[in-house]
Image (cartoon, coloured by chain):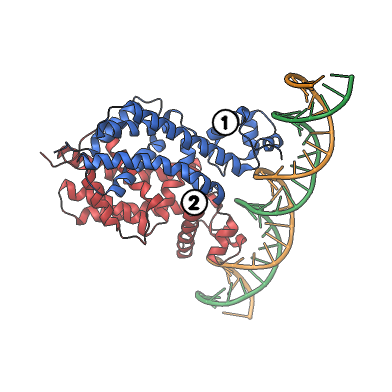
Chain colours: A red, B blue, C orange, D green
Amino acid sequence: MTVINDSPRRKELTRQAAQLFVQEGFDRTTVRMLAQEMGIKSGSLFHHFRDKQEILAAVIEEGTQNALAIARAALAECDNTPEARLQAMARAHLETLLTDRNAHVVALYEWRRLDPESRDHLSHLRDAYEALWEQVIDAALAANLIHGDRFLVARFVMGALNWTSRWYDPAGSRSPDDLAHELVAMITHDAS
Amino acid sequence: MTVINDSPRRKELTRQAAQLFVQEGFDRTTVRMLAQEMGIKSGSLFHHFRDKQEILAAVIEEGTQNALAIARAALAECDNTPEARLQAMARAHLETLLTDRNAHVVALYEWRRLDPESRDHLSHLRDAYEALWEQVIDAALAANLIHGDRFLVARFVMGALNWTSRWYDPAGSRSPDDLAHELVAMITHDAS
DNA sequence: GGGTCAACCAAGCAAGCGCTAGTGTGAACG
DNA sequence: CGTTCACACTAGCGCTTGCTTGGTTGACCC
């Protein structure tokens, strides 16, 4: 065992690991598969990561941090209406999920494979991301754009978005932006 | 190897397997864990199932068949309005998912662990279930109760429902019926 | 030119995996 | 009483798993 830092090499390896985790799932991905994808031998892998768990934690950290950054940027750029902000969040979420369909998907679907310490460390990141959503949804509720229970609406919307990774075909005709439009249209009522 | 039938004993074992698959995931569940849960030794397990894959297939088959039966019963009982039918489907879906939170969850989350033959055999069951949903959603669209693309609305609604298994607390204050109400309220517009 | 260090490799260990072979055992049936 | 059969057991095989060990390489540095 050697380093635990975040060298550029490690970032690169993390990205390649994410792809395999999405394709096969964490449990089915062996360290030998990871090593082959990375072009090294399985032993060399443990020069960069303490163990397999740490690879997962690195992937999930990158995925969540990336999603958080993109969501913040989207909110900063869009119009300041509740509807525009809702749509910006949905589009940002879908883009991190579907176009660079790697780390963020792992963060969602392999979360429970994390050991308790990593989960504890990463939950703050996830909370920050969900707090963004809650702000946006609260504003939409206040503007009478959507109706219902604050908590449930957030969960339902996240569910609809997250499930896209199960059926979305990137070669198909629909863009993430398109999907975001349709979802917002489905749940919004004309403010009145 | 011996029998492949569906004896009552096998049904019972299948139900216990489902519980472990939900808790741990298919890959993490070993045949020794399954055997212990069933109160037998790991070798005896293969008297009832050809291999581990077949246990998964049995669980998923039961989960889907159960969901299908409950959905059909719910549709037969409810009022014949598009809104009532939509809500009946949502409630039925949530009940198979959340109260008997076993086989149906496995069917949703471990589908890709099936080998191609089982997947092929079971896809007909799943198609029948999804066809029910499409009928109900088409009717709601025709009645102007919801708006949007037929395909996308169905996916979004299924996503919102399926994701509940990630956060639903059966000890909490909300019932599946309650959730179904809220979801339908969120996506329906007053027909006009 | 000796020292340092990140990066990699070859070889393999201990544990756990799915699964098999061969053997009771007790209830059911003629 | 003898046969059958569903069900279970013991024991372990062959393989894969995550991970360790000890050593090599080549770039960089004073």
Label 1 Cα crowd, 10 Å radius (few <14 / some 14-19 / many 20+): some
Residue B191, horizontal then vertical, whole percent: 16, 37
Find the residue positioned furthest to the left.
A192
Residue at numbered disc 2: A56
The subunit letter for the residue under badge 2 reads: A
From this viewpoint, is residue A66 visible? no
Label 2 Cα crowd, 10 Å radius (few <14 / some 14-19 / many 20+): many
Q: Nearer the viewer, mark 1 or mark 2?
A: 1
Using the rendered image, report if marks 1 and 2 lie on a common chain.
no
Q: What amino acid does circle 1 point to?
A: Gln
Element assignment for label 2? helix
How far apart are the two marked residues, 1 and 2, measured between alpha carbons?
A: 30 Å
Residue A43 sits in quarter: bottom right
- Please give the name of the residue rendered at 57% of the width and 64% of the height, measured from the top-left corner: A36
Residue B52 sits in quarter: top right
Residue A16, horizontal then vertical, whole percent: 48, 61
Element assignment for label 1? helix
Residue B106, horizontal then vertical, whole percent: 49, 39
In front here: B141 or A98?
Answer: B141
Residue at numbered disc 1: B16
Q: Quadrant of the N terminus of chain A?
A: bottom right
In front here: D6 or A155?
Answer: D6
From this viewpoint, is residue A23 visible? yes
Q: Does A149 sit left or right of B93 as displayed?
A: left
- Please give the name of the residue rendered at 19% of the width and 43% of the height, measured from the top-left corner: A188
